[in-house]
Image (cartoon, helix red, strand yellow):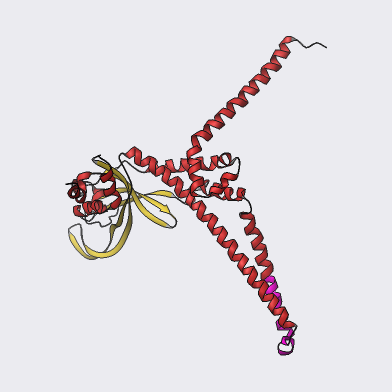
Amino acid sequence: MNQSPGFLNHVLGGITSFAQHHLAERRIHQERLAFLHQAIERVVDASEPRIRLIGNYPEKLADAVEIALHHSERVLQQLPAAVALDGHAWANDPQVNAFFATADEVRTTLSQDVPIQAFFAENRGTECFALLLMVKQEAETFGTVLEGEMLVREVRQIRVSFSHHRLFFPAASEAELRQELKQRMLVFLASRAQERINELRTGRGALEEQRRQLQAQLRAWRMQGQGLRSLLSSADVDERRLAKLEQRLIQTEEELVAARKQLGTLDDYLEQVARVLGQPETYLRVQPLSLRLNRLGLKLTENSSEPGETLSLIELVSLGEQRIGTLVRFGREESPRLNLSCG
């Protein structure tokens, strides 16, 4: 039976379309890997370089690295534009006023920061951008408040203050700073993967040592049983102690088998890295924080008639610690120590 040319053209067209689709998918895949190349290599350097011995490690890490990058972008999107740090801002910006006790504290923080001074010494620009991290503290106090036309004494109040000001990653522009932060967050997550791997190694080593000790105790106990121990102690007590040691050894060996499986091959190491980067919110997240404060730093309720300002802050949470974070900008003139050294 002869097949019509139309049928053959249809079949060939289908094959051609399939091949083109496959090539297009392959090209997109290669372009994606090329785009992620630097990020993947940065992750490998910061976590476990030996996984480069796995031939297709970029493909195996691509999804997790992409998830981590998207998470970093979401974190950065929640950080508002950089706020100015100077004496004028302290007097007029409620947020800067809350962060620092005095205008002099602003200048002291900037002038005593070694990386900031190094930045201005190495760059001709007149402005610097950086990430400011602080610790928020709340302390209970008692004071006098005006309720209507009556003064009420010994009213419980909460004073909010900010301390341990530290500046990170000085840059010449906000765009440059945000790009640096994106890369730093990726390295941070990779470092958490490295810590996870080290924890697993340490746990495995502890189990191996525990097994050696239990084996030694069992050998010693059995050797003593061949001597005079049976004449000096109860057989039932000895049997219970021996059974307890044997049970502990069995349990330890089972735990050791499970621990070895977690890092048995280089693919297991890669899996640990991918697992951490694939769950970035577990290790780094941001949460909005709203505070209404007066000029003295006292926390106000939303319905309070006392003058105050509502601050919309960002709290960075990582490894069980919280820091208030904001992007800041300031000029060379706000670092007086530098000005003196520059003549």
Which quadrant does the N terminus fall into? Answer: top right
The residue at 28%/52% (across/down) is 114
Q: Position of residue 42 (x, y in %)?
A: 48, 44
The answer to whether residue 153 shows anywhere in this view is yes
Q: What secondary structure do most residues of the magenta stretch adopt?
A: helix
Question: Does the magenta portion include 245?
Answer: yes
Q: Position of residue 92 (x, y in %)?
A: 20, 46
Question: Does the magenta portion include 54?
Answer: no
**Residue 18: quarter of image:** top right
Query: Relative to 212, is 49 above or below?
Result: above
Q: Nearer the viewer, residue 186 or 9?
A: 186
Q: On the rendered structure, is 109 left or right of 66?
A: left
Query: Relative to 190, is 148 above or below?
Result: below
Q: Look at the image and give the residue range highlighted in magenta.
A: 227-247
Most extreme residue toward the right is 1
Q: Position of residue 302 (x, y in %)?
A: 30, 51
Q: Position of residue 68 (x, y in %)?
A: 48, 43
Q: Nearer the viewer, residue 52 or 330?
A: 52
